[in-house]
Image: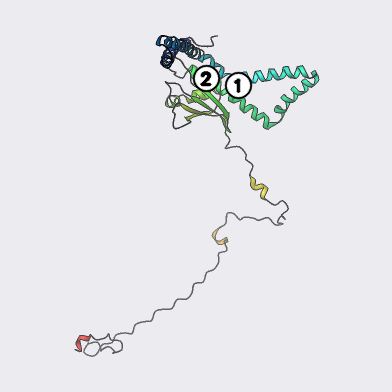
Amino acid sequence: MTVIEARVHRSSARNARLAFVLTAVVVGVLAAVVAASYWHPIVALIVGALVGVPCGAAAWLLVRVWPVLRLLWWWSTEVLLSAGLLTGWVQLAGHTPMLVTLLVVALAVGVPAGVPAIRRLVVAWAWCLIVRHRLRVCFAQFIIANQSGSLPLILWAKPTPVGERVWVYLRPGLSVKDLEGRLDKIAVTCHASTVLIERATENNAAYVRFDIKRREVLTANVGSPLVEAIDRNAPVSASPLTVPTALDLPDVDAPTITLPAQSKPAKKPATTTTANGSKPAADSSSAPDDDVSDWI
């Protein structure tokens, strides 16, 4: 079983040579220019070479071991936990009797397993460690990477009420659009229900966030704080309130509304005619005022 793939190994070797040459030349020239102000130019070139070559070697080493450093980063949490547990066991066994050692180990294992809150917390963080490795499997198996075979850098993960949230830094050759069509495969690999992806920041498209959902919390029973607001000492009514149902309209006792009586309008007097058929002259009190121009 190969820890570092052959394509990644060749790519890191090529990048390491380029880093060595570039760093050695740039640092050597800068050091020679600075040294020429104090010593002879030949001595300055020797000083530049003595400074540039070690710096180039350091750059070569850093680039060359980067795949190994990335692999150690993927397993850093497991390595630290294993080292901490092993160190604690050695120190405990060396300074306490066997009975006390077994009792401490039983408490350290039994309390998290027996207390539901602690057990759920431990399981949630364990899933975070598992999901980081499952995402790395997704990137290595069926997600298109760049020509050098460099996988995205899986940064960190934390538990959420529905699953886990993982932050990933994409390498050149991948984008959010490329991953959106493979979310169902990622969900299968992570043993989850669904997986969502979105940008973690608006300033950098390579910094993305995976939201892995493996359970539904909206259907769970949630305790309401309104229950505590009810007075437990309040008297209970002897006759419970009954709500009528299926009533017909005649069964409903509607209130009777009496409208006020309205006065009838007065009738106009009938118009009479004279013998010759002409209407009588109207009374002067009811006639309209004459025009002032008739009196002038």
- Residue 226 visible here: yes
Figure check: 257 above or below 157: below
The image shows residue 144 at horizontal and vertical percentages of: 44, 19
Q: Is residue 163 left or right of residue 101?
A: left
Question: Quick one: label 2, few (<14), some, or many (20+) residues within 10 Å?
Answer: some
Q: Which residue is mark 2?
A: 136
The image shows residue 26 at horizontal and vertical percentages of: 42, 15
In depth, the one of 266 and 89 nearer the eye is: 89
Query: On the rendered image, what quadrant is the N terminus found in?
Result: top right
Q: Residue at x 58, y 25 (%)?
A: 128
Q: Is residue 152 left or right of residue 296?
A: right
Q: Secondary structure at mark 1?
A: helix
Figure check: 130 above or below 59: below
Quarter assignment of residue 3: top right
Q: Residue at x 48, y 26 (%)?
A: 183
- Residue 14 visible here: no
Q: Nearer the viewer, mark 1 or mark 2?
A: 1
Q: Which mark is residue 77?
A: 1
Figure check: 223 above or below 167: below
The image shows residue 40 at horizontal and vertical percentages of: 41, 11
Q: Is residue 33 left or right of residue 209?
A: left
Query: On the rendered image, what quadrant is the C terminus found in?
Result: bottom left
